[in-house]
Image (cartoon, rainbow, N blue to C red):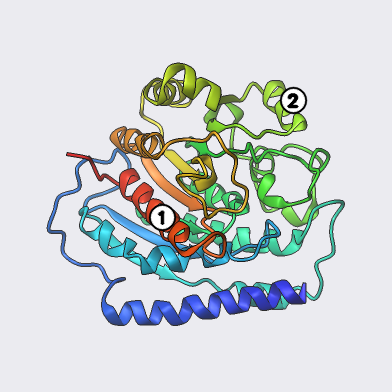
Amino acid sequence: MALLGRALARSVSHLHARTTHLHARGLSRSVPRWQEAAKISKFLPNPKRVAIVGCPFSGGQPRPGVDQGPIHLIEAGLPRQLEELGWEVHFDGHHQFEDISASIASDPPIGKLKNPRTVSKVCEAVAKVVGKHAREGVLPLTLGGDHSLGMGTVSGTLEQYPDACVVWVDAHADINTVETTGSGNIHGMPVAFLLGLGSKIEEYAWIKPALKANRLVYIGLRDVDAGEKAILREHNIKAFSMHEVDKYGIGKVVEMALDHVNPARQLPIHLSFDVDSLDPTVAPSTGTPVRGGLTFREGHYICEAIYETGCLVALDIVEVNPSLEDAASVKQTVAIGCSLARSALGETLL
């Protein structure tokens, strides 16, 4: 716990210092729109505003470095890129994870679950931040960090938009329960918590299982545990693996996915995008790469198509890990994280 606490403190301290520098350079202030956003939102007021929520957190999995994802995306120019698309941008900067860590004297496993108290407290804090932005009519763009943060981001969205649907783009289903997890890494469990599956854990009682199985759809799955497959079948959860992407093409898959969770295109959409959904040749700097993933264009098409619905109310970009692979691979993965966000927020090819 002490090691995790120090790592969190270092990450947040670095992000705070860089945030101050970015504010000084004017990258995080809202500026007058010089270009009209391309699509009218069905849920966000004009002028459209986005809040970038930096979450330098790695406690849901064992690999160091994913906590540095947010600052790399910011330093790559993401705030300015979104301003150039017509969004009013606010960069939230760092969040006080070191306070959470310091408040937990020890964090022994609960069953197999690793860092369970820290993960819970961080995600609860993220839920409050995302929920606040949603209530104010601002689109929260959460930069992870590992995908355990999805517990917080989706919870925050559902607080304001209880009928929202979730499009979870990932190589993994992230739906292991306390009973089915083999690793105990909570980044493989957030969807189970959001659906209220498995044994109840007191530390996670703050999560109100507001997500309904028929409001969830997966795209890009290709590394799913046996227990997760059983859960998907038992709860009739719609999932499009890479088999369906290969069979039908990404355009048809996205159409079918949206027809399932949002047939009239009148419900809010939360898009949670794990970069490991992309093939490792496309996004190499991520902690759990799986070959045979989405191409560059397939990943971006998902984002473009969801933006075109006018229903997007929240976006996560997670699992960029700048400590993995060489400098060129890191630069490539960070650039793709930025371009996915731009595509989800209105960038077009023409």
The quarter holding residue 226 reads: top right
Secondary element at tag 2 = helix
Q: Which residue position is annotated with label 1?
A: 332
Which residue: 71% across, 65% down? 118
Disc 1 crowd rating (10 Å Cα; few below 14, some 14-19, many 20+) is: some
Callout 2 crowding tier (Cα within 10 Å): few <14, some 14–19, many ≥20: few
Q: Is residue 9 above or below residue 284?
A: below
Q: Amino acid at mark 2?
A: Ala
* Nearer the camera: disc 2 or disc 1: 1
Q: Can residue 241 be seen in this snapshot?
A: no
Can you say which quadrant of the picture contains the N terminus? bottom right
Q: As shown in the figure, which amino acid type bears the numbered disc 1? A: Gln
Residue at point 70% right, 78% down?
Answer: 102
In which quadrant of the rendered image does the C terminus lie?
A: top left
Q: Quadrant of residue 99?
A: bottom right
Question: Which percent across, then down, holds residue 188?
Answer: 68, 45
Disc 1, SS: helix
